[in-house]
Amino acid sequence: MPETEQRRTPEGLKRLVAFADAVVAIAMTLLVLPLADLASTLRQERSLIDAMNAHSDALLGFFISFAVIWVLWRNHHEILENFRGYNATLFNLHFVWLLSIVLLPLATALISNERVHWADAFYIVVLGLAICSLIGISRQGLRHPELIVDSDAVRRSLAGWSGIGTLIALAVALIVTLIRPSLGSLPLLLLLIPGPVTAIITRAKGG
């Protein structure tokens, strides 16, 4: 018996985006739960500054991951604003992207624990998975024009979002982390480079 073709409606796309938003919100909430647990384990009176200094690694991991998830969601939001439909590949790419999002709280907890080796490398790999899936989503729009809004501005927007610079920064950060694991999360600061460089290149082309 032949399989019936799966219906894919605009309402289905809205549900996919709403589900992704919900998963992101839960992941961001999960980031703060370990900090609440740390606060409840304090056995003696301490000032706020002392308590923050005692758990500086956990706090740094929280702020980094909160910012990372925010940036990933913002990029996802900007890309999906160009879509009016979806296909099976786009659907499956969302599975990969959401998997990386829900893994980030775990990766954050691992890098906050000094006894876990190669936790920073795992964190970088998870980020790479998220970026690769976003690249795949944007490429789907370019390869299947019927999925996106029929507009030159939309096509330029998708073509301009490559994510390659971020992937290169992640690859360098991973190599540095594998060579010098004692640096901890410092190689992640390389992720600050692609944004300004892309902005400069864009302005130069516009000029």
Image: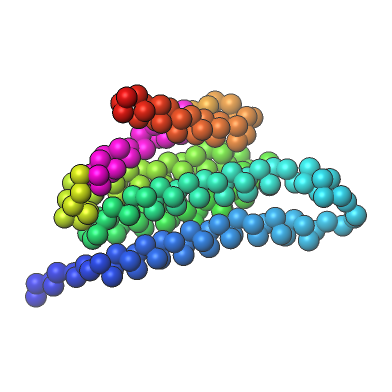
Asked whether residue 139 is in view, the answer is no
Q: At x 53% / y 58%, what residue is drawn?
A: 27
Q: At x 30% / y 37%, what residue is drawn?
A: 160
Counting from the top left corner in percent of width and height, residue 136 is at 29, 46
**With 59 as the anchor, is 143 left or right in this view?**
left
For the record, the magenta segment spans: 153-172
Q: At x 73% / y 43%, what residue is drawn?
A: 56
Asked whether residue 38 is in view, the answer is yes
Q: Is residue 150 within the magenta segment? A: no
Vertical placement of 20 versus 167: above or below?
Answer: below
**With 90 as the anchor, is 57 left or right in this view?**
right
Q: Is residue 160 within the magenta segment? A: yes
Counting from the top left corner in percent of width and height, residue 141 is at 23, 49
Majority SS type along the magenta span: helix
Vertical placement of 128 versus 174: above or below?
Answer: below
- Give the quadrant of residue 87: bottom left
How did the renderer colour the structure? rainbow
